[in-house]
Image: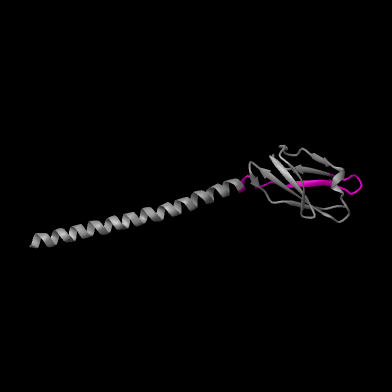
Amino acid sequence: MVNKKAQSQIITTILIILLVLAAIIIVWQVVQGTIEQGSLEIEGQSSCMGLRVDITSATNESGEVIIRPTKDISGYNIYVEGVEFNTSDTPLSALSTATLDNEDLGLEKNQEIEVIATINGAVCPGTKYIVK
């Protein structure tokens, strides 16, 4: 009889250890997924660090917008007064300029233009400019 009590305590201890290990594995799966997703987002946004897209010119007379990024970008979107006007998937190298000369732009004084650049699929913070 004494041996059976000792065996049941050992089995109970082993079952508790197995339950704790199962709980640790389940919690780790959730935490690992969250960590991996967060690291991918950080990696994507870190490519935007140090990027500034200068709008060197935007006038209502010529209707053209000239932009110059400080880093290589893979594309950009131009918004006029919050409305998307033009999207370009053409890469633009650092410190080179792109001129958007479009008669449909219809720029007017004091309108707000925003340029949002993308780098390898990561959308970077935009640059705003008021038309002169």
Q: Is residue 63 magenta?
A: yes
* In this view, 117 is above or below 93: below
Residue 1, position in %: x, y?
A: 7, 62
Q: Is residue 104 visible?
A: yes
Q: Position of residue 90 (x, y in %)?
A: 72, 37
Residue 71 visible in rendering: no
Range drawn in magenta: 45-64
Residue sitting at x 27%, y 57%: 17
> Does 109 sit left or right of 4 as displayed?
right
Residue for point 88% across, 53% down: 108
In the rendered image, residue 83 lying in the magenta stretch gets the answer no
- The furthest residue to the front: 104
Question: Is 13 rendered above or below residue 57?
Answer: below
Q: Quadrant of residue 13?
A: bottom left
Q: Which residue is depicted at the point 18% across and 61% down? A: 9
Extreme residue in the right direction? 61
Between 50 and 90, which is closer to the camera in this rendering?
Answer: 90
Residue 8, horizontal then vertical, whole percent = 16, 60
Whether residue 31 sits left or right of residue 11 in the image: it is right
Q: Nearer the viewer, residue 84 or 110?
A: 84
